[in-house]
Image: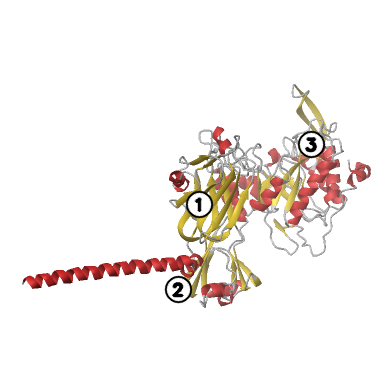
Amino acid sequence: MLKKLGFVFMCLMLLLSAAVPVGLAEGETDVTLYVRGNKIVDGQGNIVRLYGVNCPSLEWTPRGDQMPEAVIEAFDNWDCNLVRLPMSQDFWFGHHSSQNDGGAEYRRLIDEIVNIARERNKYIWLDLHWSNAGTEWGKYTGQHKMPDENSLTFWLSVAEAYKNHPNVLFGLYNEPHSVSWAVWRNGGKVQETVTADGGLKRMSISYNAVGMQTLIDAIRGIGANNIVIVGGLDWGFDLSRVTDPDYELVDTAEGNGIVYDTHPYPWKNKNWSNIIDKTGAKHPVIVGEFGIEADASDPTKPDDSQFKNYYETLINWLEEHQYSFTAWSFHPSAGPSIIKNWQYEPTPYHGAFVKDLLVRVSAKGVSLFDGKAYTGNMINVNPGEYSEADLKQAGMEPSAIRSVKLSNDPNLPYRITFYAEDNLAGKSYSFISDLDDLGKTLGGFTVKSLKIENITLENIGKGARVECSHSAKEGGAVTDGDEETKWIIDEEGEKWVKADLGSVFTISRIIIKHAADSGFSANHNNQDFKVSVSADGEAWTEVYSVTGNTGYKTVINFEPALARYIRVDVTKGSRKIPGTRVTLSELEVYGMKDKRAEDFMKGSGQGILNSYLGWIIAAAALLALIGAGLVLAVKGKSIKAKN
């Protein structure tokens, strides 16, 4: 078969005129990955853990669904550093009924997605997901047992386009199955049943499967040294024999290495230690797919019928072995689905677990700087208690800290507490927001030790006093904590609500719940609106605006800000014509009182007002006492007079 490579390569060159090997631009960081032992590392030898999601659809449609927007969302808002991108060998060359350009637009879209990763110093796993059993191009497109001779043609083309691209990994074939380990490695004749005539007829076909070693050799043969990812048997799950001398894959001396892919779905064998971890002790392992569907009796919970405590077991196992992973799937119609819709709301039975895991594994901790405004030397520290000696060992004298960045992980809030004495003793101040001038904020306070905690912010908006543009009596429904009570207005003109927290807090998240999560009433979810915050009710900062919303729940994360008042202005409500109906069921505000908020209250007009109020109350009390004394005196005098 390898005798054909020279001829195939010559045939591909015309297709590759727009796809040239990538070099680094001036000043660009080289993020190329390598395999060292059972770890993935960067060029400096630092261990790199990859984590992300699968963004499917380019295997079943050349245009993709929400592409490249879904990839951008995964990178920017779900904390992923890797996206697995399922592809079709037929579409790459334009063999779909909707394609008439030889695949040029499909390849352009793939290239756009790769550039999105490159701009962010993140990674794309190009995954050959669907093949055609080596038959006529465009025929029998779908999932097959093994890659075929057309898959070899595909990989020669893709490898030439992205050879040595620092952000691209090559996934040879999705979920090989139902063949021997010898065929898996070396190839051979494969027979399987396919559907024909629009699914009306089933027929048996045979084709020459191309082994994983052959694909690796072909890719390396054209000088592409990118990391190669190889799935095991049993639909990509079983890695039990990839370390056997007869089946172990071999890379070239120049190659960046081989990573093994496994898909431990809940219906698979539970003996992961033998089927996966044996390989993980010798080679890097990536969990390329995992997930679980919803419980039929309660769609908010995962279906544990085939694997009790699946997520708890899986996540603990991933963390114990520090395996890389990409969860299936970042698409609302390809289950198990991470998202409910194209507003990227996580499904409660799967997506919520994935999002929480991504937040935690991507956490960068808190950054401490020895210069103001986040300049100078910097160290990152994770949650924990730090004595003076601990901080010195980490690389910074506690008294040298001049600025602090707490906002590294927007979905994982931190609180930092500074202590005037070593070992968390003495006077202390706590913060949940970035500090660009620590000395000024602390007012001469010298730091000797500190504590960093992950915190769960409370809904401090519950019970807040509400003003609104219409029906003031019903306005309190948006802060009563009851989603069944709603503020509903169906009139022309301005529509707004303003919540008063009663005091200034540091806040970083607002959640707005509209009309309904599903059913006909979901048509009444507000479309166009903006959200603003203010500490004094006069100077307002817009933290969010949207047009065309359709979802029930809007989650707004932003840099921690001082706020007492939160205002929602709705300019377009229901999707039902004429769009004047506005529905709000809840306005939730998440934050806490920290030193910044306390200092604002002391130094602001609000603090002065509170002082005045305090004086007025004190004066009133004094007058009351004086009045009471006078009465007593008068009473006493009249009593004396009587005597």
Residue type at mark 2: give it: Lys
Q: Distance between the residues labelled 2 and 3?
A: 66 Å
What is the x, y in percent for residue 603? 48, 70
- In the image, residue 44 sits, relative to residue 56, either above or below, namely below
**Residue 102, quarter of picture:** top right
Q: Distance between the residues labelled 3 and 1?
A: 56 Å
What is the x, y in percent for residue 255? 81, 55
Locate the C terminus by quadrant: bottom left
Viewer-side residue, 476 vs 250: 476
The residue to which callout 3 is attached is 131
Residue type at mark 1: give it: Lys
Q: Residue 498 carries which label?
A: 1
What is the x, y in percent for residue 286? 68, 49
The residue to which callout 2 is attached is 427
Asked whether, in this view, residue 317 is left or right of residue 167, the answer is: left
Local packing at callout 2 (Cα closer than 10 Å; few below 14, some 14-19, many 20+) is few
Viewer-side residue, 496 vs 428: 496
Q: Which residue is drawn at 47% across and 55% down?
A: 500
